[in-house]
Image: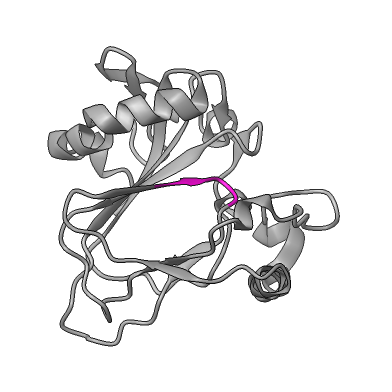
Amino acid sequence: LVDAYALSHAALQAAFAERVQRFLRLVLDEEPLLFQSLSFERGSEQPVHQDTAYVVVTPPLSFAAAWIALEDVRPGSGELAYFPGSQRLPDHLFGGAYKNWNRERDGLEAQERFHLELLRRCAAHGLAQATFLPSRGDVLFWNADLAHGGTPILDARSTRKSLVCHYCPASAVPYYFHHRPQHRRVLTFAPGCRYASSHYEL
């Protein structure tokens, strides 16, 4: 579910919890703009990737993510995997020039190579995979270039309810501000807590 906060006051409360706000202001050095979220009922099983390949902001590294656990996460539920230190790897540039992948410009093969090469680069730099087994209410923040993905779901009955939020400094520009003028509207949830949506017209 994309941008649940556009429809849910509870999602906005979670996205702008007091400790979340405080941390974001410290790392972004500005008031945060919530510009996208993803809600998951179950594990995503996504390949290991870096958000900068898919989440486009100007400047490219001017965003942070928060993974908010909505329930206790159990092993085998497709828990989040990540590689500490991978945000310091040299840039992967699509076509030798772009940090983001574009299907029309780069093709599906380039995306597959990116996933495989990222795992190889993590291994070459001695970066070990970690998994996130949070309790409900725990939050994991990560840098825009942290390599992460979803592990296989081993128990089909298990859920992994979570809310993933993407924030940028108020001075940065999400990609859809350029291409979807009807989605440029920014609303205020609380002082210093603003949000926009790529999916809904607010």
Q: Nearer the viewer, residue 125 or 35?
A: 125
Depth check, front residue: 5 or 117? 117
The quarter of the picture where the C terminus appears is top left
Q: Main secondary structure of the magenta part?
A: strand
Residue 124 appears at what percent x and percent y?
A: 73, 73
Residue located at (86% from left, 55% from top)? 96
Quarter location, residue 78: bottom left
Q: Position of residue 111 (x, y in %)?
A: 66, 68
Inspect this view and state whether residue 16 appears: no
Residue occupying the point 49% across, 29% down: 27
Which residue extends farthest front? 126
Q: How is the image coloured?
A: one colour
Q: Residue at x 41, y 29 (%)?
A: 24
Magenta region, residue range? 141-145
Give percent across and percent down for residue 20: 30, 33
Q: Nearer the viewer, residue 193 or 195?
A: 193
The question of residue 164 being in magenta is answered with no
Q: Residue at x 19, y 58 (%)?
A: 135
In the rendered image, is residue 120 in sight?
A: yes
3 up-or-down from 120: above or below: above
